[in-house]
Image (cartoon, grey):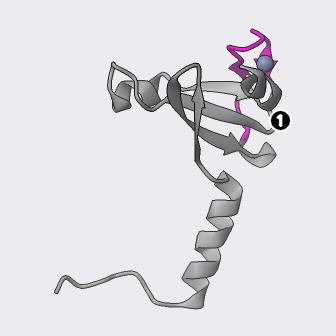
Amino acid sequence: MPRRHRRESHDDDFLDNIERLKTGFRRRETKRGNTYVVQPISESRAVKEYRCPGCQLVVSIGVAHVVAWQEDSIMGADQAVADRRHWHTHCWRIF
Ligand SMILES: [Zn+2]
């Protein structure tokens, strides 16, 4: 049996939950026949500006939004993640 370094404590579970809350849940969405992985970004984690591909405007720092990439890209999963895009939540919804 390999040694387990992870402590079995309530503290760890608590930290896991905090981390999950901060990052939000990943989900899958199908749009226009393609499957995307969608990762919500909370306000506190939005620390850079991005260009939204939906409206071509800036996703400002401190604005909760989503990151999405195509899960079934013919370029492969790694390339798809590298090509991920940050969208306004509204723009992604109507995409
Ligand atoms: Zn937008």
Q: Is residue 90 above or below residue 26?
A: above
Q: Is residue 71 left or right of residue 67?
A: left
Numbered disc 1: secondary structure: loop
Q: Which residue is mark 1?
A: 63
The residue sitting at the bottom extreme is: 9
The residue at the point 43 percent across, 26 percent down is 80
Q: Which residues are magenta?
A: 46-59
The residue at the point 78 percent across, 32 percent down is 89
77 or 86, nearer to the observer: 77
The residue sitting at the top extreme is: 56
Q: To which quarter of the image does residue 31 belong? A: top right
Q: To which quarter of the image does residue 3 belong? A: bottom left
Quarter of the picture for ligand 1? top right
33 or 1, nearer to the observer: 33
34 or 45, nearer to the observer: 34
Q: Is residue 22 above or below residue 91?
A: below
Q: Position of residue 36 (x, y in %)?
A: 53, 32
Q: Position of residue 4 (x, y in %)?
A: 30, 83
